[in-house]
Image: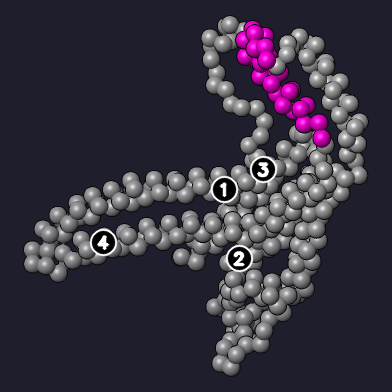
Amino acid sequence: MNGLKMKTSVIFGVVQMLMGTCMKGFNAVYFKDYIELVFECFTQLLLLTVLFGFMDYMIIIKWLTNWNDDAEYLDKGLVAPGIINSMIIMFINFGSKPEALTGDLEQADLMPNQKGTMRMMLYIAGICVPLMLSVKPLYVKFTQKAPKKHEEEVNVEMVAINSDFQAPPAHDNSYQKAMTDNEREFYDCCQHILADVHPHEFGEVLIHSMIETIEYALGTVSNTASYLRLWALSLAHGQLAKVFFDYTIRMTIDMSFGYIACFVSWYVFFAITFSVLMVMDLLEAALHCLRLHWVEFNNKFYKGEGYAFRSFSIEKVIEA
């Protein structure tokens, strides 16, 4: 049962991370950034799928195979393979299984031509990493505008905005006070965006792309392992319940007048179990789930940019 919970938590984790990467793709479509869509979102989806989606596929195959009654495996002296061992063989030995030690049973393959399939997955993952790293910086390098031309366009835009708002010099705040909240927000946003007169340099974009690629590639391992906290919580809850039962109800079974003590101990067991497992541990589980949403899920697409949040106010709407 513990193995089932552990593998189920990993499957949930991979599915949620794939959803987070899809959200990044939706953002790229919304902002019409098709280079990011193709060479970041699609490659990240492919990388996560060929590594840990493939691991989930092996888990499901292992679940659906009857290893105890299958004559094909029993006659050959094969045993069910460990998923972790299979992933280690995939990364370290490039899919080639080492020879079994004397007295040890050889692990069976989960699929036909497992060695070739593992190698193909590693080849695809190896292609995805340089695509994520290099395509976007090269695109920026060959398509960005010259600094002088870019600065001229920015100056034209700033003149147009200032003429629309009739903005006074920077030291005069009288006009800022006269603007409505919506106008002030729009004006400040335009000034902030257009003040950056220098286009992104190739080195800057390359460093950013390198950091993001390394973070995502290593995060596929660490984030997947982080979802094991769901299994750990379930294991801790089961062990705590067993300890509470052993030291309350089970201790009273062999006592004289055991039925009276058992009756009383049941209420003790109920009170402790409810206060610890149903109150304290539910809060702990909720915090862990929030952490998984914020770190493992949101870091796939959330960047914290855009407009600052401003709460709804009827008074401001009426004044406007």
Image location of residue 16, percent across then percent down:
61, 49
Residue 183 highlighted magenta (yes or no): yes
Q: Kindly state the secondary structure of the residue where label 1 is placed.
A: helix
Amino acid type at circle 2 is: Ile
Q: Nearer the viewer, residue 210 or 276?
A: 210
For the residue marked with disc 1, what is the amino acid? Val
Query: In the rendered image, which quarter is residue 185 located in?
Result: top right
Q: Residue at the location (59% across, 71% down)? A: 84
Q: CA distance from mark 1 to mark 3?
A: 11 Å
Q: Which disc, if any, is residue 295?
A: 1
**Is disc 3 placed on a helix, strand or loop?**
loop
Label 4, residues with CA under 10 Å away: few <14, some 14-19, many ≥20 = some
Task: Find the magenta span and give its range.
Answer: 171-198
Q: Tell me the chief SS of the magenta region.
A: helix
Using the image, tell me which numbered label, if any, was put on residue 301: 3
In contact (CB < 8 Å): disc 4 and disc 2: no
Quickly name the residue at label 4: 245
* Of callouts 1 and 3, the N-terminal one: 1
Label 4 SS: helix
